Image (cartoon, rainbow, N blue to C red):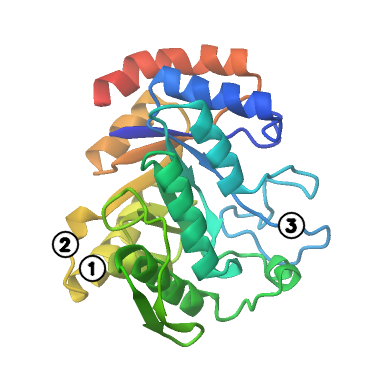
Amino acid sequence: MKFGLTAPYQMGAIEDGDYATRFARLAEELGFESVWVVEHAVMCVECHSKYPYHPSGRSPFDEDVTQPDPLIWLTWAAAATERLRLGTGILILPQRNPVVLAKTLASADRLSGGRMMLGMGVGWVREEADAVGTSFDDRGRRANEYIDIMRALWREPVSSFQGEYHSFSGVVSKPKPVQEGGVPIIVGGHSKAAARRAGRQGDGFYPLGVDLDGMRGLVDVMSQAAREADRDPATIEITMGGAPNADLAAQYRDAGVGRTVIFPGTGDLDELRGQLEPFAENVMQRYA
C-alpha cells in the first residue's frame, strides 16, 4: 500500500513558498508516495450548501482559510522534490475549462517527469459555482464530458470531440503528459454517482467521508459500473483518507485499499516530523 500526505490547511502557512518547500521535502524524506491538496476558488461567508462529509453539514474550513491554487502549489512542490507524486484531492472539475485544464495538467506532468495525479470531484457548494460563473445542477454531466475531453487531448495526436458542452475538431494540444494514457484521473466523492463515474471513467476511486462499510458499498457500485463498461474493476485503484494509525492502515490494506492519504495533526513541521517518523518506520515501510 502507498501513503500520501495532505497539506495542513489552517494549521500551517502552506501559501508561503519556503513552508511549502519544506513540507514537500519532509513528505519525500519520510517516504510518502504523494502529497495532496484541495481546491476552493472562493470561500463563501454566507453558505447555505450542506457539507456532505460531516453530519453537521458544516465544512471544517472557515471562510478565512487560505487555499492556494492546487496546480500552482503542486508545481512548486514538484520543483522542490524528485520522486514525490502530486495529487489534487479534490479539484472541482466542473468549475474548470477542460481544454485549458488538459494543457495545464499535461504541462505540469511533463515538467515534473510524470508525477501528476488528478483527483477530481463535482463540488458541493452552489454559492461557489455561482461565483465562478458555472452551473451547479448539471455539474455531474459536465464532469463526465470533461474527463473524455481531456483524455482525447492527451491521447490523440490530432484531437476532435463532439459533446453537449464542448465541441472541437482537428486541434493539437502539446505537450502531452509523460504518463502513458495521460494524467491518472482519480474520481472522488461519497455518492453512488461518483462511484459509477469511477467505474466508467476513473483510473482510481477516492471515496470521501465514509467508513470501511461505506467504502465497501461504494466499491461494489463502482465495480458493477466498471463491468457494465467492459472494464476490469481490479484496475481501478482505491484511495482512502485517515489518521496515521497502524490499525486503520491494516484494515485498509486488508480491504484492498491501494493508497492511504494521511491527514496531518499539526502544521508545525518539526512536530509533524515527530508524529510521522514512527508511523513511517513502523507502518509505511512494512506495508510498502
Query: As displayed, is residue 281 above or below residue 5?
Result: above
Question: Does residue 148 appear left or right of residue 276 in this picture?
Answer: left
- Which badge, 1 or 3, is on the more N-terminal residue? 3
Residue 263 in sight from this viewpoint: no
Q: Is 284 or 48 nearer to us in this picture?
A: 284
Q: Is 196 or 143 nearer to us in this picture?
A: 143
Residue 24 in sight from this viewpoint: yes
Query: As displayed, is residue 86 above or below residue 119?
Result: above
What's the amino acid at mark 3?
Answer: Val
What's the amino acid at mark 2?
Answer: Asp
Task: Residue 31: name its quadrant.
Answer: top left
Q: Position of residue 26 (x, y in %)?
A: 51, 20
Question: Does residue 246 appear left or right of residue 273 in this picture?
Answer: left
Q: Residue at x 52, y 52 (%)?
A: 90
Label 2: element kind: loop
What's the amino acid at mark 1?
Answer: Ala
Q: Position of residue 265 (x, y in %)?
A: 59, 27
Q: Position of residue 223 (x, y in %)?
A: 23, 64
| Contact? badges 1 and 2 (CB < 8 Å) | yes
Q: Residue furthest right?
A: 45
Classed neighbour count for the residue bearing mark 1: other residues with Cα under 10 Å, few (<14), some (14–19), many (≥20): many
Classed neighbour count for the residue bearing mark 2: other residues with Cα under 10 Å, few (<14), some (14–19), many (≥20): some
* Residue holding disc 1: 226
* Residue holding disc 3: 42
Instruction: Choose mark 1 or mark 3, whichever is in front.
Output: 3
For marks 1 and 2, give the CA distance: 6 Å
Per the rendering, the mark at residue 232 is 2
